[in-house]
Image (cartoon, rainbow, N blue to C red):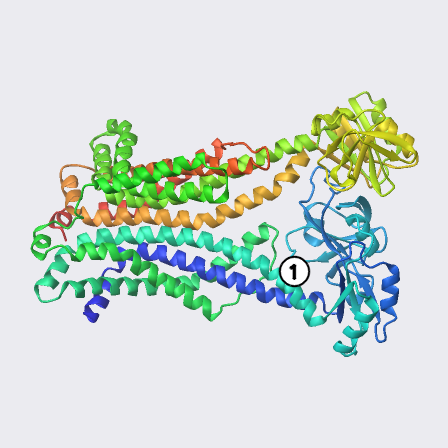
Amino acid sequence: MLKLTLRTALSHVPRQALAALAVVVGVAFIAGTFIFTDGAKDAMRAQASDLYRGTDAGVYTEDHDGFGDAALAKLRKVPGVTAVEGALFASGSVLPSPAEPTRRPPMGWIAAMPQNPVFTPYDLVEGRTPGPGEAVLDAETYTDYGFELGDPVGADGDGATRSFTLVGVIDVSKTRVAGRSVIGVAPADALALNGDTGFRQLRVAAPGVDEATLVAALTKAAGPGGSVLGHDEIVELELADAYRDVDMIEKGLLLFVLVAILAAGFVIANTYTIVMAQRARQIALLRLIGASRAQTFASVLAEAAVIGAAAAFVGLGAGIGIAALLSLVMGNLGLGFGSAFVIEPRTLGVAFATGVLVTVVSALLPAWRGTRVPPVVALSATATETIRPVGRVRVLTGLVLLAASAGAFLLPASVPQVGFIGITGFFGLVALGPAIVPALARIVGRPLHGLGGWAKLAVSYTARNRRRVAATTTTLILCVSLVSSVMIGAASISAALDREAEKNFPADVTVQGQDVPDALVARLRDSGRFTLVHAARTGEIGGLRVVGTDPGLLEKSEPGLGLAPGKAVVSKGVGKKAGEKLVLAGHAFTVAGVSGMPGELVLVTAPDAAALMPDAPVTELSLVGGDAEFVREAVADYPGLTVMDVDAFKEARTAGLDRLLASVMALLALAVFIALVGIANTLTLSVAERGREHGVLRALGVSRAGMRAMLSVEALLVAIVGVALGLGLGLAVSAATVRLLGEVSDAGLVAPWGRLAALVGAMSVAALLASVLPASRATRKPIVTALSGE
C-alpha cells in the first residue's frame, strides 16, 4: 500500500497542484512571520547594544521632577566617572518645512541628543550634533519633506512647541524607530518640549571601572530616589520593552496566518471531495482485490500527508519572501526592526507540521466519505461527486447561528460581542451555503440567459452541485468579509477623525511659532480678508499654563463652556469646579466651565490674557475666512513660523490610518489569493470531471469561445455570490465595531462605496483570470478524446 500511495500521489500531482499551492502560501505565511519576528529580535539586540555602546551604567528615578543639575553634578564627582548626561525619548511631531508648508510629517519622536560624543546613539549623515536652539532630523523626514540644513524646523511636544535651526541629519534606518520622524535636540531643549523639569534617566560613562563598584558608588550618590543598572541590565531592560512590541506584532500576524490556513483548509477539503468522487472506481477496485476500508482510508490520508509535506517544504523556502514583505509592511507603518532574517528550528518544525496537519485534517472527511461507498455502487456510478440533499439539521443549525449573530446586536457593545457576531455569522453562512448559494447563483445568472444556451448551461452547472459551489464560496466569504470590514471600519474611523479635526481645529488657518511678530498680526488684520484674526498669548502663572482664547472658537470646539471677560475655563488638572473662584496674578476669575483638555490649563479671553501677561508672546494666530495661500505668502518673510490649514490638519491625522489600511490589505491579499486559487482549482477539477459533457457540447456545435465564456461565467457567478455574502457579513461586523467605537467617540458607520465597488470589480476580474487555465484545458482537448472519457 505504501508504494501504491506514493505512486498515486505522484500521478495526481497535476490535479492537486492548486490545492498544494494554497498550502504553500499558508506555510510561507507562518514561516515568514517567525523568520521576521525572530530576525527583529536578533536585530534589536544588536541595536540596543549599539545604542548604549558608550554607556557603562544608567541611573533612573520615578520622581516626576527627575534629576536636576545638582544631581548630575553630584554623580559626575563619583570616582572613575568621565561623563553624565540626561536621556529623553518622547512622542512628538515635526512641523512642516518652509519648502512644503502644507505637508506635516506624521507623529514621531523627540530625542535628547547627547553633547558628549561617547553617548551618541545615532550616526550623523550630514552636519553636526545640535547645540541649544538647534536640531537634527532623521534622513527620511529630511528628504521626503523638503528640509535643508539651515532651515527653521519646528517641534511639537507634550509641553511646548518650539522652533530650531536645522544643523544635521541622522541615520535611524537600522533602529526600531525607522519609518517615523525623529527630531533630536539638545537635552535642555528636549526637557522643555516634553514639559519636564528634570531627566528620569541618566547615562553614565566610566571606562575601566568595575561594574559592581560603579553601580554601588552611583547608588550611594543618587540617593534613595534613584536606581542604578549596569550596561547589560540596561540592554536587557530596553530589549524587554522592545520584545513586548514584537510579541504583540507576532500575535497580530498569526491572526492573519489563521485566516490564510483556514482558507487553505477549505480549498483542500473541496479538492479532496471532488478527487475522491473521480477516484471512486479506483478505490472500488482496490477493495475488490483485497484492500480493506481502513487501508484505503489510510492510503488517502498518507497521500495527503505526502502532498502536504512537499507543499510545506516549498512553503518554507517561500517564507523568506514573505518575511521580506512583512518587513516592508512594518516599515510602512513606521515600525522599523532592521533587516536581519533568522531561521530557528522552531520555525522549521511548526511550519512543516502545520502544512502536513492542515492537509491531512482537511482531507479527513472527504476521505472517510469516499471510502465508505460500497464497491458495487462505485463501479456502476459515473466519476462525479454524489449529489446529496441539504439536511434539515444543517439548515436549522445555519439559521440558529445567523439568528444568534443578529441577536448579539442587542447585547452591550464589547470586543467579545464583535467577535461573536463575526464568527457565528460566518459559520451560519457556511452551514446554509449549500441551500442559499445555488439559489443566489440562479438569481444573479438569470439576466445572462439572453446571451445564449452556453450562458444557461453555465448557470445550471454553477447551481447543480450545491455543496461544491458553497465550499468554493466559503473562502471568498471569509476573505471578502475581512477585507470589507477593514475598509468600512477605516472609512468610519477616518470620518470620525475628520469630525474631530473640525472640532479641534475651529479656525480655517493657524500660524504657530514661539513669538508671532506684531507686524504680521497687523498685516493680516489690515488685509480685510479675514472675519477673525485671533492672537493667542501663552504664558505661565503660578504653575498654570494660561492661554488667551477667542470665545467663539472655543464654542465651536467645546460648546457650552461659557467663556467671557472676567471668566475662565479650566482643565480638570487645575482642580476647580464651575462657579468657583480662581486668582491669577492678583486678578479674580470665575470658573465658567471645565474643559476636557489635558494638563493644568487655564483659558481666558484675549483682553484678559493681555492684561494678565502683557509681555507674553503670541504663540498662535487663528484666522477665519480668507485663504491659506495669502497667509503663507505673508508668513514667508518670517522664518520659524508654521502655517496649517484644516485640510492639512486632517491629512496629518489620517495619514497613519491610511498606512495601516494599506498594510492590512497587503496581508489579507495572501488569503484572497488562496480564495482565488480555490476557484481555479474547482474549475480545473470540474473540467476533468465533465470531459464527456464538454465533448458532447463541442460535437453539437458549441465553439471554443462559447466554452471559454461558459467557464468564465461559472467563475464569475461563484465570485459574485461569495463577494455579496462576504460584503453582508463584513457590513455586520463593521456595524458592531463602529458601535463599540461609538462608546468612546462620535464614530458612525460610513461605507466607502467607491472602494467597495473597486473590491467587487477586482474580485470579478480575478475570478475571470482564474478561469483562463481551466477553460484553455477544456477547449484544447480533441472532441474524440473528450467523448472517450480518457
Give the side of residue 13 with respect to residue 289, left or right. Answer: right
User: Around disc 1, counting alpha carbons within 10 Å, would you say few (fewer than 14), some (14 to 19), or many (20 or more)?
Assistant: many
Tell me which residue sits at (39%, 65%) in the image.
352
Q: Amino acid at mark 1?
A: Thr
Tell me if residue 421 comes above or below residue 192 in the rendering: above
Image quarter hosting the N terminus? bottom left
Residue 175, image x, y percentages: 65, 60
Tell me if residue 129 comes above or below residue 55 in the rendering: above
Residue 125, image x, y percentages: 73, 59
Tell me which residue sits at (47%, 57%) in the image.
322
Viewer-side residue, 293 vs 139:
293
> Which residue, given by chain and number where applicable, does mark 1 sit on?
175
Label 1's element? loop
Viewer-side residue, 436 vs 469:
436
Tell me which residue sits at (27%, 46%) in the image.
683
Give the side of residue 730 with respect to residue 305, left or right. Answer: right
- Total marks in image: 1
Residue 497, image x, y percentages: 61, 35
Tell me if residue 198 comes above or below residue 532 in the rendering: below
Residue 83 in sight here: yes
Residue 711 in sight here: no
Residue 567, image x, y percentages: 82, 27
Give the side of residue 329 with respect to residue 213, left or right. Answer: left
